[in-house]
């Protein structure tokens, strides 16, 4: 069974268009990773077409709904220009649940503009991003090839989507009873700069950041859309 999605080249003339293009790609990438890493049975995925290439899509309604809601929550924060990256993290099965693989989508180079101007056309009036679907296609192919060659994961792994805030002083975590976000575990936290006069301590970067092995996937660059993607394999994956 196959489904076809039209992939017209987006015109990246506003920040909203840039974020929409990222959300579109992120959705496809998450489905691809879940398929290639055997998080769910491969028989639960169907073959679809996106960016003019074959891709995999989960056909389980609850999985699709989770991905849809998660990407929508990321898009809300992206439109506030508060995020520097988004990561899909695969965890070992209980009781350890250590991070095994971290697929990172860095959007730190996206423009930062007031939220009231996300629909305002860019002043430099960029041309239509006619090559963006081609770059997305190349990235998905590279992602599929790389992930299928990684060492197998144990059965019953889980996954989650993690976002990282920009370092701007006016950026605050979107935590609270009315938001879908919770704080990430300490091992995935980055060092926070001090706001007082005490000496800066040695780096306190989370122990699960960076991993033991990092493999670049691809950089996508078209107009205001600049994204880098790579995968980190954590030490928990190589421990007996």
Image (spheres, rainbow, N blue to C red):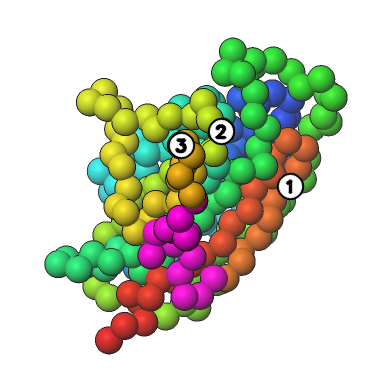
Q: Position of residue 149 (x, y in %)?
A: 50, 78
Q: Does the magenta run of residues contain 207?
A: yes
In primary-sequence order, the first of circles 2 and 1 is 2
Identify the image quadrant of the C terminus. Answer: bottom left
Q: Earlier in the sequence, mark 3 or mark 1?
A: 3
Residue that sits furthest to the bottom in the current view = 240
* Dominant SS in magenta: loop
The residue tagged 2 is: 168
Report helix, strand or loop for mark 3: loop
Q: Which residues are magenta?
A: 200-214
**In this figure, which residue is indicated by the disc labeled 1?**
221
Q: Nearer the viewer, mark 2 or mark 1?
A: 2
Q: CA distance from mark 3 to mark 2?
A: 17 Å
Task: Identify the mark at residue 125; answer none if there is no mark.
Answer: none
At 64% across and 29% down in the image, what residue appears? 112
Using the numbered discs, state the Cα–Cα distance from disc 2 to disc 1 in whole angstroms: 23 Å
Badges 2 and 1: C-beta atoms under 8 Å apart? no
Residue where numbered disc 3 is placed: 196
Q: Secondary structure at mark 2?
A: loop
Q: Earlier in the sequence, mark 3 or mark 2?
A: 2
State the residue in front, 160 or 27: 160
Above or below, 205 relative to 98: above
Identity of the residue drawn at 31% across and 42% down: 183
Residue shown at the point (47%, 75%) measured from the top left:
212
Place of residue 137 in the rendered image (x, y in percent of width and height, measured from the top left): 64, 54
């Amino acid at each position: 069974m196959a489904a076809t999605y039209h992939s017209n080249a987006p015109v990246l003339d506003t920040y909203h268009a840039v974020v929409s293009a990222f959300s579109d790609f992120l959705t496809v990438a998450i489905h691809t990773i879940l398929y290639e890493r055997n998080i769910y049975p491969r028989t639960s995925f169907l073959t679809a077409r996106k960016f003019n290439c074959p891709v995999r899509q989960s056909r389980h309604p609850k999985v699709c709904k989770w991905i849809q809601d998660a990407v929508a929550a990321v898009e809300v924060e992206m439109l506030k220009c508060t995020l520097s990256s988004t990561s899909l993290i695969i965890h070992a099965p209980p009781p350890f649940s250590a991070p095994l693989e971290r697929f990172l989508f860095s959007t730190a180079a996206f423009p930062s503009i007031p939220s009231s101007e996300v629909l305002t056309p860019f002043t430099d009036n960029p041309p239509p991003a006619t090559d963006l679907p081609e770059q997305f296609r190349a990235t998905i192919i590279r992602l599929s090839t790389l992930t299928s060659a990684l060492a197998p994961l144990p059965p019953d792994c889980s996954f989650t989507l993690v976002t990282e805030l920009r370092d701007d002083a006016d950026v605050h975590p979107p935590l609270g009873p009315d938001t879908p976000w919770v704080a990430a575990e300490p091992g995935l936290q980055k060092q926070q700069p001090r706001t007082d006069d005490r000496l800066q301590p040695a780096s306190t970067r989370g122990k699960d950041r960076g991993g033991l092995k990092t493999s670049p996937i691809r950089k996508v660059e078209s107009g205001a859309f600049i994204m880098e993607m790579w995968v980190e394999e954590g030490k928990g994956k190589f421990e007996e």
